[in-house]
Image (cartoon, rainbow, N blue to C red):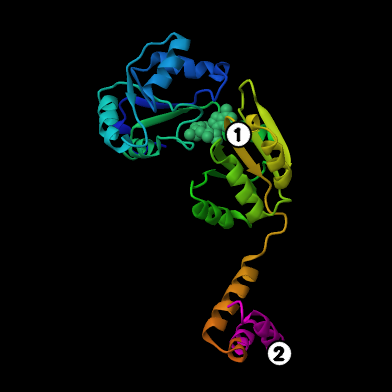
């Protein structure tokens, strides 16, 4: 329910566009693009091509990651003057690893009407044909470019039981898969979807080690755009196991093994003797 119905003037339509095959634009998206007064887009030249294909001429304003916050007032002004607008990104659904979140948030907060016009997203398209569990999935978007940040993000989701979904570019696909193999284990099942809805659409399936081999076998397999879907962890380590080891090692940094074992015996009710043995094993790693 809109919490500020009196302030609603015009509507911002958030319109999904194709990710490759132009025939994937919905009829409703075409109608909305043809009927709005102006279109906010990521890259005006890119959107101009789509509009030319559709035979639509509209004023365009650019809203991208670097100017989005400055554009919000301008968009609010247009809507307040009663001009309906559409928001599109270069491909797929706006806001999904694309600009639009600050704008939609500001409009929703200000009581303007925001209407989604659904269509393609690479994530859902890839999942629908991957053959991995889709009852629960975690969309992780793009990983950091730097290896240290990437590995840290992967470590954070290594225990997840849901299917993991990542976006990746040709520049980092092999590096990211190598880091996944190292962090999740080379046997973890993965499906890589490349160039969805385009001429060279391909799916690579197998363990992380096998898929890395498939992609490495020819430069052509590393070209284009990628969605990487990794099976969830079938046997995650529980939080209490992780905490126990971490806590034990932290205690061993501060206390002699006997004292650390005594504290943990008190905390957990486990045998002091067994914990002392464990302390002797771990004291050098602490
Ligand atoms: N908003 C888009 C969506 O709804 O999917 C995503 C935009 S994001 C900037 C671009 C990334 O999406 C690409 O780097 C790739 O990971 C993925 N992607 C987009 N189109 C794709 C395609 N045709 N095939 C495979 N992945 C694609």
In the rendered image of this protein, does residue 171 appear above or below residue 61? below
Residue at 29%, 34% in the rendered image: 72
Q: Is residue 132 visible?
A: no
Q: Is mark 1 within 8 Å of ligand 1?
A: no
Q: Secondary structure at mark 2?
A: helix
Residue to which mark 1 is pinned: 124
Q: Report crowding for label 2: few under 14, some 14 to 19, many 20 or more residues within 10 A (C-alpha).
A: few
Counting residues from the N terminus, which is met first, the one under dot 2 or under dot 1?
1
Which portion, as a residue range, is magenta? 261-286
Q: Report crowding for label 1: few under 14, some 14 to 19, many 20 or more residues within 10 A (C-alpha).
A: few
Q: Position of residue 162 (x, y in %)?
A: 65, 49
Q: Position of residue 260 (x, y in %)?
A: 59, 86
Q: Is residue 271 magenta?
A: yes
Front disc: 2 or 1: 2
Q: Secondary structure at mark 1?
A: helix
In the rendered image of this protein, does residue 174 appear above or below residue 181? above
Q: Residue furthest top?
A: 55
Q: Is residue 83 visible?
A: yes
Residue to which mark 2 is pinned: 273
- Which corner quadrant holds the N terminus? top left
Residue at 71%, 50% in the rendered image: 188
Q: Does 144 sit left or right of 175 as displayed? A: left
**In which quadrant of this rendering is ligand 1 seen?**
top right
């Amino acid at each position: 329910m809109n919490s500020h119905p009196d302030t609603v003037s015009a509507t911002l339509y958030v319109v999904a566009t194709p990710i490759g095959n132009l025939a994937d634009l919905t009829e409703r998206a075409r109608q909305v693009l043809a009927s709005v007064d102006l279109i906010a887009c990521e890259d005006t030249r890119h959107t101009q091509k789509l509009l030319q294909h559709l035979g639509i001429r509209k004023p365009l304003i650019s809203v991208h990651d670097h100017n989005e916050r400055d554009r919000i007032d301008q968009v609010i002004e247009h809507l307040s003057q009663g001009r309906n607008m559409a928001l599109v990104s270069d491909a797929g659904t706006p806001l999904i690893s694309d600009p639009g979140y600050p704008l939609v948030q500001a409009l929703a907060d200000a009581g303007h009407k925001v209407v989604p016009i659904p269509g393609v997203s690479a994530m859902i398209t890839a999942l629908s044909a991957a053959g991995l569990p889709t009852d629960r999935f975690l969309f992780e978007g793009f990983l950091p470019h730097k290896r240290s940040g990437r590995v840290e993000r992967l470590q954070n989701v290594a225990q997840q039981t849901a299917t993991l979904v990542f976006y990746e570019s040709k520049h980092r696909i092999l590096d990211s898969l190598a880091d996944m193999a190292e962090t999740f284990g080379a046997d973890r099942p993965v499906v890589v979807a490349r160039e969805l809805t385009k001429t060279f659409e391909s799916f690579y399936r197998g363990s992380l080690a096998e898929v890395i081999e498939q992609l490495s076998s020819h430069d052509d397999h590393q070209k284009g755009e990628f969605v990487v879907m990794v099976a969830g962890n079938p046997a995650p380590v529980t939080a209490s196991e992780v905490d126990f080891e971490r806590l034990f090692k932290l205690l061993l940094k501060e206390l002699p093994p006997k004292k650390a074992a005594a504290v943990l015996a008190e905390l957990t009710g486990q045998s002091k003797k067994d914990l002392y043995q464990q302390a002797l094993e771990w004291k050098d790693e602490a």
